[in-house]
Amino acid sequence: MNKTVAPSRVTQSPKASSRFSKWLSNLPLTLLVLLIVFLALYPVFWIYMSSLKGNLEFTTYQMWALPQSLHWENYLRAWTEGHMSTYFVNSLLAVFPSLLIVILLGVSTAFGIEIMQWRYKDTTALLFLVGIMVPIQVVLLPLFTTFYKLHLLDTRLSLILVYVTFGLPLTVFFLTGYFKTFSREIIEAAIVDGASIYQVFFKVALPMVTNAVVTVAVVQFFFMWNDLLVSLTFINNPDLRTVQSGLLSFVGQYGQRDWGPTFASVALSVTPTLIVYLVLNQMVMKGMAAGAVKG
Amino acid sequence: MQGTLRDWRAVLVFVGPALLLYTLILLIPIIWSLGYTLFSGSVITGFKFVGLGNFVQLTQDQKFQSALWFGTKYALVVSSGQVVLGLLLALLYAFYLRKTSVLVRTIVFLPAVLPTVAVGQMFAKLFAIAPQYGLVNSLLHRVGLDSLVQAWLGQAGTAFWVIAAMDIWKAMGFYAVLLYAGLVEIPEEVLEAARLDGAKGWNLARFVVVPLIFPIMISSLIFSLNGTLKVFDSIMALTGGGPGTSTMPLTLYFQKVAFTYSDYGYGSTVALMLALQSLIVTLLIFRRARKDVT
């Protein structure tokens, strides 16, 4: 985990005049910071702004102009004609079961590896590292063959199986790291008191890692919601496409002419991630950074 | 008590399901994929043993070689951009914005969580030329630089830079946070001592700060390369590998061989090369970095 302890820096209290000259000398940097913030935010703002424009406004007014009137029907068209409603349901039905399963399996595996005492625990931990390094392309063809034979192509189950499996390495690593810092005495005390190992898991360990579980779940949510490759590979039926693969095909069909609805569908795909980030940004940043350090 | 923690049935209950799934969906397919490299054909047409034929084919396959080269070039440019700009941002956070940097950090990080497909669509519109000018072309037109108005995504050279700019824009805030975490761990006494010796500004950053966080920079670079060498979504959303095959990295070439030409054997061989490419680049950086430190 990253400690975000800011070092204490000495702040002098300069006289007013020198304070002004300091402000002046910092001005270029302040402008730079404003520019950076602008560059980070403006494209996102541009999506929402353009999503409310009528098709004619794109040609008759400047690209950076605010919408003349609010064309909410762009969203309606993206939602119905553009099938975004179907894609949303499909994404939700693939992402949430996957999240639930990957967390359940990940926590119990991390507990089993870090807390339980057995011979091959280190080898098993190492085995889960393989998944972080191997590109997903390596397994796509064997999986495609298997799913074809088992009639799992064009099913949500195929997505869930792959999302869960590829979510496991990071989840297991993140949570074993958490269990490492865990006071073993509490677990030992519970066992001495007669608790079974399952009671220890559900009543002692699980409540203590809730924070870590939420963090890793949020990070996995972004990976799964934003996935294109897996969905593109195993889903061919337009009715089962997820938001990202659906968006790609929507743009292929309407993207050239209908800019308003296209921006609306882009906005629809971005919004869930934006909401999660607005609420949980510090947790997301910490979680994603920790994932990188471990990987 | 040790008995409870050593209960193998409990271990099986805790670790078994995940390990089983992981073995079936990931470990076995890896071995299986290695086996495929010796065959040609697909699940529908049937397989034919070709020995090392697929590997021979690699050496004669122009498209493969250009994809390998494009992917490597792209990854080196984008990863350097992500880490260098990330470092500059981190320095700005740590030494200029200091404790108030949390808001800026959070805002600049934001693009990292957005879906790449959606961001790609947005960039496609930013750089559009038809049926109407996108934001960039209309700005150029407005300020009288009409000679620069062009089909940014329709030419191999400019398309490369648009994709690169997008992936750098998307991830630099993330690397800034990673590197910032390293910067704030530098003890204040070290910086104070360097300042007393007369180091400030650029020199302080170059000769004191950067060497201290060099290990984090290297791991960031390796992490970044592992992502950029496997780039897929950004290019699918922006150019689909075009114009022609000029922006096609190995991941898109794999998709083409595997699912358009339905050649599982050769597809698996390309996938194996992708894995080796990541491994080799990572090892090279790692060795280079160790030499630099000692």
Image (cartoon, coloured by chain):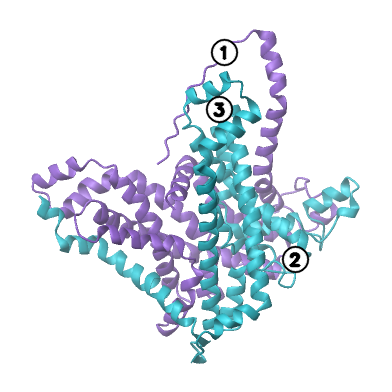
A246 above or below A71? below
- Look at mark 3 in the image and give the residue it sits on: B98
Residue beneath the point at 83% across and 48% down: B139
Per the image, label 1 sits on a secondary structure element best described as: loop
Q: Which mark is residue A256?
A: 2
Chain A is shown in which shade? purple
Q: Badge 2, how many Cα within 10 Å: few under 14, some, many 20+?
A: some
The Cα atoms of the two marked residues, 2 and 1, are separated by 58 Å
Q: Which badge, 2 or 1, comes first in the chain's sequence?
A: 1
Judging depth in this view, the residue of B107 and B289 nearest the camera is B289
Query: Mark 3 and mark 2: span between their CA atoms?
Result: 45 Å
Q: Amino acid at mark 2?
A: Gln
Q: Residue furthest top?
A: A15
- Chain letter of the residue beneath label 3 in the structure image: B
The disc numbered 2 marks a residue on which chain?
Answer: A
Q: Which residue matches tag 1?
A: A12
Is label 3 in a helix, a strand or a loop?
helix
Q: Position of residue B188 (x, y in %)?
A: 49, 24
The tint chain B carries is cyan
